[in-house]
Image (cartoon, rainbow, N blue to C red):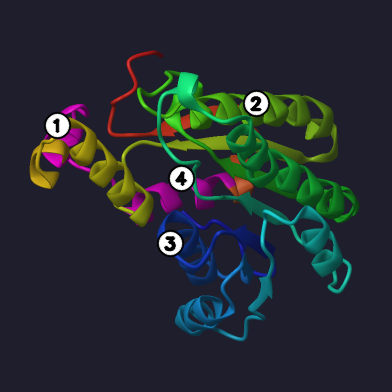
Amino acid sequence: MNLNLKNKNALVCGSTQGIGKATAILLAEEGANVTLIARNEEKLKLVLAELSNNNQNHNYLVADFLEPDQLKNVLQTIDLQFHILVNNTGGPAGGPIFNAEIGEFEKAFTLHLKCNHILVQALVPFMKTAAYGRIINVISTSVKQPLDGLGVSNTIRGAVANWSKTLANELGQFSITVNNVLPGATNTERLNEIIKNKSAKTRLSIDEVSKIMMNASPAKRFAKPQEIANAIVFLASEQASYINGINVPVDGGRTKSL
């Protein structure tokens, strides 16, 4: 299948590692011009050097999503002609929701919703002009089934999913789609942190916690970041033009609901 991403411009958030990096690499392989955005410039340079380049125009932006005004300022310095936006930010710290401090909710809301919204407001005008827009939000299967021990994440991810569905309803008439990809347990640094925290709390070994988590999925393994990227890049393509406003779990079947 030809995904027809040549001459499409993509902005990929959180693209120095994990799912974001895998997505940026695959978009470049499919012919898109990729702009990376994250807070660590040295890591951005390393990923930029890994992108396939067949007369493509790749770039990077440095921004800390804990500072929304900084993100706004960065966006004012560039040409905002992007056809594809991949909203992807590392998840909040784990823990029971009852124990969460108010500041944890505020921090997560800024990272995951405020900055998503800033990016959408900046990029959608061009998408309307181009009559082509793909907004893909990398969230979590917790929007369908809250996950134990991830209270703040469950709360904020649900807010992002509803924000996304509302946008899909508003923007569909302009040939702009808005969809959510919901990764299950994926082999990333984020997952390693979750496993370590569970190990410390349960006094089970890292291997024991990992095995329990793997067994929660019918696939009996963790996802590779590239497997999540495959779904994201398809949703960014012309072939996904009539897919809009949905949540796509990529979790090996772990989620119990339909």
Prevailing SS of the magenta stretch: helix
Residue range corresponding to the magenta coloring: 210-235
Nearer the observer, disc 3 or disc 2?
2
Residue 228 in the image: state x and y as whole percent.
Answer: 40, 47
- Residue, x 62% and y 49% (percent of image)? 87
Q: Quadrant of residue 11?
A: bottom right
Nearer the observer, disc 4 or disc 2?
2
Secondary structure of the residue carrying numbered label 1? helix
Q: Earlier in the sequence, mark 3 or mark 4?
A: 3
Q: Earlier in the sequence, mark 4 or mark 2?
A: 2
Residue 100 in the image: state x and y as whole percent.
Answer: 51, 28
Q: Is residue 86 magenta?
A: no
Q: Is residue 231 magenta?
A: yes
Mark 2 and mark 1: Cα distance apart in space: 29 Å
For residue 68, side relative to residue 191 (left or right): right
Q: Quadrant of residue 166?
A: top right
Q: Earlier in the sequence, mark 4 or mark 1?
A: 1
Mark 3 and mark 1: Cα distance apart in space: 26 Å
For residue 232, side relative to residue 68 (left or right): left
- The residue that label 3 is drawn on is 22
- The residue that label 2 is drawn on is 159
Secondary structure of the residue carrying numbered label 2? helix
Residue 60 in the image: state x and y as whole percent.
Answer: 65, 75
